[in-house]
Amino acid sequence: MRSIGKSFPGVRALADVSISVRSGEVLALVGENGAGKSTLMKILSGAQPADTGEIFIDGERAHISSPRDAERLGIGMIYQEFTLVPQFDAVANIFLGKEPQRGPFLDDADARKRAAALVAEFGIDLPLDRPVGELSVGIQQLVEIAKALAKNVRVLVMDEPTAALSEREIDRLFEIVATLKGKGVGIVYISHRMEELARVADRVTVLRDGASIDTRTVAAFPIDEILQAMVGRPVDARFPELPVVAPEAPVRLAVAGLNAAGVREVSFEVRAGEIVGLGGLVGAGRSEIVRAIAGADRATGAVTIDGTPLRARTPADAIAAGIAFVTEDRKAQGLVLGMSVLANTTLAHLERFARILGWLDVSAEERATEEMIERLRIRTPNAAQLVANLSGGTQQKVVLAKWLLGEPRVLLLDEPTRGIDVAAKAEIYELMVGLARQGVAIVMVSSELPELLGMSHRICVVRQGGIVAEFTRAQATPTNVIAAASGAAA
Amino acid sequence: MNPRMRLVGTIVVLLLLVIGVNIAAHGSFLEPSNIVRVLRQITYNCILGVGETFTILTAGIDLSIGSLVSLTGVVMALLANSLHLSGFPLVAVVLLAGIALGAGAGYVNALPVVRLNLPPFITTLAMMQVALGLSYIISHGRPVPLTSNAFNSIGIGSFLGGLSAKLHLPALPIPVLWMAVVVIVCSLLLEKTRFGRSILALGGNEEAARLAGIAVHRVKTMAYVISGICAAIAGFLYMALFSTGSPQTGTGDEMLNAIAAVVVGGTSLAGGRGTIVGTFFGALLIGLLDNAMNLLNIDSYLQKVVLGAVILLAVALDEIRKRYLAAR
């Protein structure tokens, strides 16, 4: 891929990026979230068109304008989210859309024979005749690989293939990667896990802010230099100054022995007026921790607010105890898009506006909403506007308005500035500082390293569901946070 | 898109239809007596549709309402015949018993939906069969004629007959009054109360509603309970109209027509968007169409074809307009 450029409205996702992978080689593609890895691979797979640049396959200029083109050219993709039909067995999944036929009918016997030959050729060991939904994630990934191989791939892209695998499954995956290399397949391997690179990759390309920064052989690219290339510039000063947390400030939120799906034995405390950042890789369990505290998922363990333990574990109980939870995905979990700014703002605190027989005092709702619109500078023509018609940043402010209406004591923010413009980001940071001054305890999950470093008094790094490291503001550097997150001994 | 704008579309179609038909029928269509006739005819469909609106707003459905009309009708008739009461106390006891039965059936409908996350299509389909079977068992398969005449005035009586006679207007039938009360009460419930807001929120985004602390299970259950209560009220009015509780009352197109009224009235089957007033106008549109085709002597089989086409057209137009607005 040469000189690839891609812009989205308001964002330059890729600028003049070039990468190459040779036959029988593994190229590791690394970079922070948002560095442009996914966009680059979407262009390669035909999911999105490039604005500029060219793609060559085996020396020939390739025109890829749809996933079909990419498939025809022998480009295979294995995404983090699988594309399998869980009810079908491995054979049916491998040949999905190109089933062997005899006349008008499916030729199951032939499909089975060909699938068996395929997995034998690449040394993949998997049960062919069970619904893949019943198989472990590791085995499902093998089915994905077999599915790609059935299309005679020349280039295989693997996006964080080990994210959900056990150590044994990772070993098996690497054996298969070695076999593929032996067969002359070129592999683009995207990973956040530094410790894997030396085992699996031949060369490493680092992307940052939509540009290719450096490419070297793995032997000539020590991990600390890779991390430096990934992070690049020092954290910039666009963050407001955080208020000092008084050493005698009381503990507002105490979490002890929290366990949930994806969360193992998490314990930490947040003082009044303190902002604690939860760092770590996507899928490390950060969101799961805040969801468990907010009562969104089933969990065990103790959550204590101002010394009072939370008893039952539903969102309503958490809200009553003074917890506000701004979810990661505002459209799927935060907002009712078809409802007005007003209805969304008051949704979590309707009891405050309900009079006899549940009758809602709309003028009180209007007053409260107008107040929030003013306080958070929500850019909406009026309170009756449907939130679906607002920009991402404005929508995020409506979510915040909903939670601030309850004057929370604990604020949980999951990726509070994802996908919003710089101006709205700055306003949200200011707001966080203001709340901290008022004594609100804030827990912020963020995948943006500068934000994590710039907006936290303390950073807890989460890996595989547990807190593996903790840094004070003074101790935290991009390098040691990334190193802790990826499990590298840096 | 705003449900009110959808409603405007329905009303415009309605007006055009009314004017066109009135011209074709030489003015007989807009005669007060004909209007009242239409209102009386749509009463049952409208009340059922109002109940159905609540379940559809939660992105669910209630297929059992027709059978519940039969079951509550039969049970109420048997109860009325066995009680040693008369006049208003009899009517009140029978009605309350019917409403309790409808509410209970709605609760049973909702239980597997909220507890086991079963699709409401299945649970209410099962209830549809169970309730119908029970109504035949209880009545031994025969209509149950009422022995008391306490219900007559509710079924066929008129409201303020003297006053309307003075004004040379047709009297308003009592069932139409019931419809008005159901529409107004339910409309206020949906638009003005915390419960209504919760229904719309969970239909629009259940996860966001849950995380906002809304008791989604309870709210959903209430939607099915209301649907059951509306079915019981329709069952009560049918029983009063025919002076009989019959297991066959709700076995025709009642349920499908109610769903049609909801959908034509602009409520989204995906949940979260819709109004009770819209359902009233949906029922009115279907009723007027029926009536117009009768006045114009259109073959009754062809009427079904037209009705089907109108339902499809109404929803398709709505979808097209929605896309047009979204694309702007």
Image (cartoon, grey):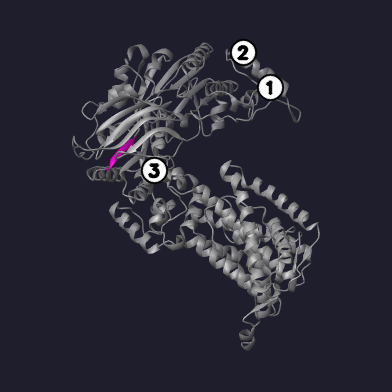
The number of numbered discs placed on residues in the rendered structure image is 3
Q: Position of residue B25 (x, y in %)?
A: 71, 77
Q: Is residue B181 visible?
A: yes
Disc 3 to disc 2, C-alpha distance = 53 Å
Disc 1 to disc 3, C-alpha distance = 53 Å
In primary-sequence order, the first of circles 3 and 2 is: 2
Give the main secondary structure, helix, strand or loop, of the magenta stretch. strand
- Residue matched to label 2: A120
Circle 3 crowding by C-alpha within 10 Å: few under 14, some 14–19, many from 20: many
Q: What stretch is highlighted in magenta?
A: A440-445
Badge 1 marks a residue whose secondary structure is: helix
Disc 2 to disc 1, C-alpha distance = 14 Å
- Residue matched to label 3: A318
- Residue at point 72% right, 21% down? A109
Q: Residue furthest front?
A: B84
Badge 3 marks a residue whose secondary structure is: helix
- The chain containing the residue under callout 1 comes to A
Answer yes or no: are tags 1 and 3 on the same subunit. Answer: yes
In primary-sequence order, the first of circles 2 and 1 is: 1
Question: Identity of the amino acid at label 3?
Answer: Ala
Question: Identity of the amino acid at label 2?
Answer: Ala
- The chain containing the residue under callout 3 comes to A
Question: Identity of the amino acid at label 1?
Answer: Ala
Quarter of the figure with residue A196: top left
Q: Using residue A193 as the reference point, say whether residue A166 is left or right of it.
A: right
